[in-house]
Image (cartoon, rainbow, N blue to C red):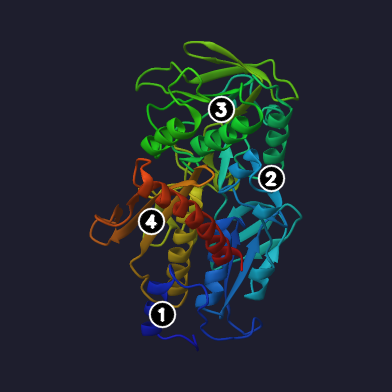
């Protein structure tokens, strides 16, 4: 490897989480003996990994396989439902990655031959690799709810992959009568974006408050609690009359060991999004139903034999190499990466650590010990943002990742004068966070 020393590599990998403009030379793509990495999935995790592989070592030939020409971020997509953001503002292309020398192939990966180290796509192409990084996101367990299916989800949407379903759900809410009931069926843990259903309720409540004040949001939750629960419920009280007779939001959780608010069936599905849902305790009629199914790793992960009985992918947290197949790394939502959450920012952080490990391994060097960061913002109402942040460190002795004490934390609670100013700043930080994260991944 001509343009990197061990010392420089370690410096670079340690700084990867904070830098996006590092360059290690400009070895031409046709250089003989180039190592090959194939990245499957062009979401935040896969895009970041592909970019940083090239940033860290231009002697590596990187191919990104992604069927879609544009990626719509799930984070911030709830603002489309409130009318505060356009769907196009979430759209990102891959020209930035091409500028770094990444070969972008718009096809669907259909198989990985771990023995031969070959990825196959739906159009018949085959791509050999020295190492493969898989970032397939999530798939949905439609059959977990009786009466639900992939086809039914075209009407009773999940909108948990931003794009056409986000637009469909927004249109259904616009067409819903004033005084109607919007039902959100939250998924069980673990799932992509733990605060997402509750930010969604907040954003839709903001829309209802302005345009359909007689309407109501009912959250049916299979869990006894949820991410940032105290901050959300305080915000709902502040803005939406939570726990009063005029509340726009009602949350019904499920005590441990109970099935009271676990939705087990859905029926009478109509194109306008209306449906009947049945829990272990009661039946409900929704004028618009948003059913977010249980989730597992993206389909290609299961097809390639990267998942265990949980439906997720076990990995070595130092390198994100699969514990089931050598030379394949899994990052982002699909991986078993607890205590890191399944979030876009965590995927970005994991992707950089994985890229650093892959560069090291391809150059016969020891993978550096990674540190991870996660920050997640939610907007309850205009001028009211909240966040959670954490830092995580890998321990060589245990092979596990744990949170760093004293690092990160939650937004402060309460709505006194000083905290109102802080909440407004949190909203500003949220938009800056979004712009920085997407630029780091896609530009």
Disc nearer the start of the sequence (3/4): 3
Specify whether residue 169 is in view: yes
Mark 3 — residue? 184
**Label annotation for residue 9:** 1
**Label annotation for residue 316:** 4
Picture quarter containing residue 103?
A: bottom right
Disc nearer the start of the sequence (4/2): 2
Could you say where residue 299 lies in the image, as x and y percent from the top left?
59, 43
Give the secondary structure at mark 2.
loop
Could you tell whether 177 is left or right of 206 in the image?
Answer: right
**Residue 167, placed above or below residue 183:** below
Could you say where residue 200 lies in the image, as x and y percent from the top left?
55, 37
Dot 4 and dot 1 residues touching (CB under 8 Å)? no
Give the secondary structure at mark 3.
strand
Mark 2 — residue? 163
**Residue 68, placed above or below residue 143:** below
**Label annotation for residue 147:** none
Picture quarter containing residue 404?
A: bottom left
Q: Residue at x 72, y 59 (%)?
A: 106
Could you say where residue 39 lies in the image, as x and y percent from the top left?
58, 62
Along the line of sight, the residue nearer the viewer: 423 or 218? 423
Dot 2 and dot 3 residues touching (CB under 8 Å)? no
Give the Cα distance between marks 2 and 3. 18 Å
Give the secondary structure at mark 4.
strand
């Amino acid at each position: 490897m001509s343009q990197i020393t061990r010392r420089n590599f370690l410096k670079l990998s340690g700084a990867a989480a904070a830098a996006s403009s590092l360059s290690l030379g400009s070895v031409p793509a046709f250089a003989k003996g180039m190592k090959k990495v194939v990245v499957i999935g062009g979401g935040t995790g896969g895009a970041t990994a592909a970019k940083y592989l090239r940033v860290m070592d231009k002697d590596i030939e990187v191919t990104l396989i992604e069927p879609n020409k544009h990626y719509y971020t799930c984070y911030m997509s709830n603002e489309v439902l409130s009318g505060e953001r356009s769907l196009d503002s979430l759209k990102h292309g891959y020209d930035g990655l091409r500028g770094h020398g990444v070969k972008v192939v718009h096809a669907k990966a259909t198989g990985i031959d771990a023995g031969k180290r070959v990825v196959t796509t739906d159009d018949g192409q085959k791509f050999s690799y020295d190492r493969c990084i898989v970032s397939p996101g999530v798939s949905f367990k439609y059959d977990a709810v009786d009466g639900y299916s992939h086809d039914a989800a075209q009407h009773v949407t999940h909108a948990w992959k931003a794009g056409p379903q986000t637009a469909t759900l927004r249109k259904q809410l616009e067409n819903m009568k004033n005084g109607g009931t919007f039902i959100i069926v939250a998924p069980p843990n673990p799932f992509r974006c733990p605060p997402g259903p509750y930010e969604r309720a907040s954003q839709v409540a903001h829309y209802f408050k302005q345009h359909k004040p007689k309407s109501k949001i009912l959250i049916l939750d299979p869990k006894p609690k949820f991410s940032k629960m105290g901050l959300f419920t305080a915000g709902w009280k502040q803005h939406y009359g939570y726990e009063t007779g005029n509340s726009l939001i009602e949350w019904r959780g499920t005590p441990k060991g109970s099935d009271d608010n676990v939705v087990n069936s859905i029926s009478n599905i109509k194109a306008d999004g209306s449906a009947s849902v049945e829990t272990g305790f009661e039946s409900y009629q929704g004028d618009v139903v948003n059913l977010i199914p249980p989730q597992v790793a993206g389909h290609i992960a299961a097809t390639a034999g990267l998942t265990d009985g949980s439906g997720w992918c076990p990995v070595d947290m130092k390198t994100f190499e699969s514990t089931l197949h050598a030379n394949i790394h899994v990052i982002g939502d699909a991986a078993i990466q607890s205590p890191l959450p399944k979030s876009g920012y965590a995927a970005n952080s994991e992707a950089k650590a994985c890229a650093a490990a892959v560069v090291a391994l391809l150059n016969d060097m020891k993978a550096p010990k990674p540190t991870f960061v996660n920050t997640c913002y939610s907007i309850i109402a205009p001028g009211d943002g909240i966040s959670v942040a954490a830092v995580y460190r890998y321990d060589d002795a245990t092979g596990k990742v744990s949170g760093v004490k004293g690092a990160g934390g939650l937004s402060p609670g309460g709505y006194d004068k000083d905290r109102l100013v802080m909440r407004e700043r949190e909203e500003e930080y949220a938009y800056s966070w979004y712009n920085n994260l997407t630029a780091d991944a896609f530009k």
